[in-house]
Amino acid sequence: MIILDAVTDGKVLCGDSRVFDDVRDRVRRYIEGKGLVRTKSGWFPKDMVK
Protein backbone atom coordinates (compact mmCIF):
# COMPACT_ATOMS: atom_id res chain seq x y z
CA MET A 1 0.00 0.00 0.00
CA ILE A 2 2.99 2.30 0.28
CA ILE A 3 2.88 2.53 -3.51
CA LEU A 4 -0.59 4.05 -3.30
CA ASP A 5 0.74 6.67 -0.88
CA ALA A 6 3.77 7.43 -3.03
CA VAL A 7 1.77 7.85 -6.22
CA THR A 8 -1.10 9.83 -4.71
CA ASP A 9 1.24 12.19 -2.81
CA GLY A 10 4.12 12.21 -5.29
CA LYS A 11 5.19 14.63 -7.94
CA VAL A 12 7.55 14.38 -10.87
CA LEU A 13 11.08 15.54 -10.10
CA CYS A 14 12.65 14.56 -13.41
CA GLY A 15 11.83 12.62 -16.52
CA ASP A 16 8.66 12.36 -18.55
CA SER A 17 5.69 13.57 -16.54
CA ARG A 18 3.32 11.76 -18.93
CA VAL A 19 4.56 8.43 -17.57
CA PHE A 20 3.83 9.50 -14.01
CA ASP A 21 0.42 10.85 -15.06
CA ASP A 22 -0.37 7.44 -16.57
CA VAL A 23 0.68 5.67 -13.37
CA ARG A 24 -1.36 8.11 -11.28
CA ASP A 25 -4.44 7.46 -13.44
CA ARG A 26 -3.99 3.71 -13.07
CA VAL A 27 -3.64 4.04 -9.29
CA ARG A 28 -6.79 6.18 -9.10
CA ARG A 29 -8.73 3.58 -11.09
CA TYR A 30 -7.38 0.83 -8.82
CA ILE A 31 -8.43 2.74 -5.69
CA GLU A 32 -11.90 3.39 -7.09
CA GLY A 33 -12.27 -0.16 -8.38
CA LYS A 34 -11.37 -1.67 -5.03
CA GLY A 35 -13.45 0.90 -3.14
CA LEU A 36 -10.54 2.01 -0.97
CA VAL A 37 -10.33 5.01 1.30
CA ARG A 38 -7.22 6.43 2.92
CA THR A 39 -7.03 6.66 6.71
CA LYS A 40 -4.25 7.50 9.14
CA SER A 41 -3.62 3.76 9.44
CA GLY A 42 -3.53 3.03 5.71
CA TRP A 43 -5.86 2.12 2.84
CA PHE A 44 -9.04 0.21 3.66
CA PRO A 45 -12.25 -0.78 1.89
CA LYS A 46 -14.98 1.82 2.37
CA ASP A 47 -17.27 -0.63 4.15
CA MET A 48 -14.63 -1.22 6.86
CA VAL A 49 -14.22 2.47 7.71
CA LYS A 50 -16.76 4.31 9.82
Image (cartoon, rainbow, N blue to C red):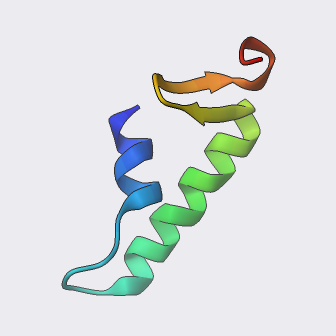
Q: Which image quadrant is residue 14 in?
A: bottom left
| Residue at 21% across, 81% down | 13
Q: How many marks?
A: 0
Residue 40: x, y in percent?
48, 29
Query: Looking at the image, which residue is at 34% across and 36% down?
Result: 2
Q: Is residue 22 above or below residue 48?
A: below
- The residue sitting at 35% across, 64% down in the picture is 10
Q: Is residue 41 above or below residue 17?
A: above
For this orientation, the residue located farthest to the left is 14
Q: Quadrant of residue 18?
A: bottom left
Instruction: Using residue 29 as the reference point, say whether residue 17 is left or right of it.
Output: left
In the rendered structure, the answer to whether residue 18 lies left or right of residue 11 reads right
Q: Nearer the viewer, residue 40 or 38?
A: 40
Q: Height in image: 22 above or below 5? A: below
Identified at 34% across, 73% down, the residue is 11
Q: Position of residue 27 (x, y in %)?
A: 55, 52
Position of the N terminus by quadrant: top left
Q: Quadrant of the C terminus?
A: top right
Q: Tell whether 14 sits left or right of 43.
A: left
Q: Whole-percent x and y of residue 16?
A: 30, 87
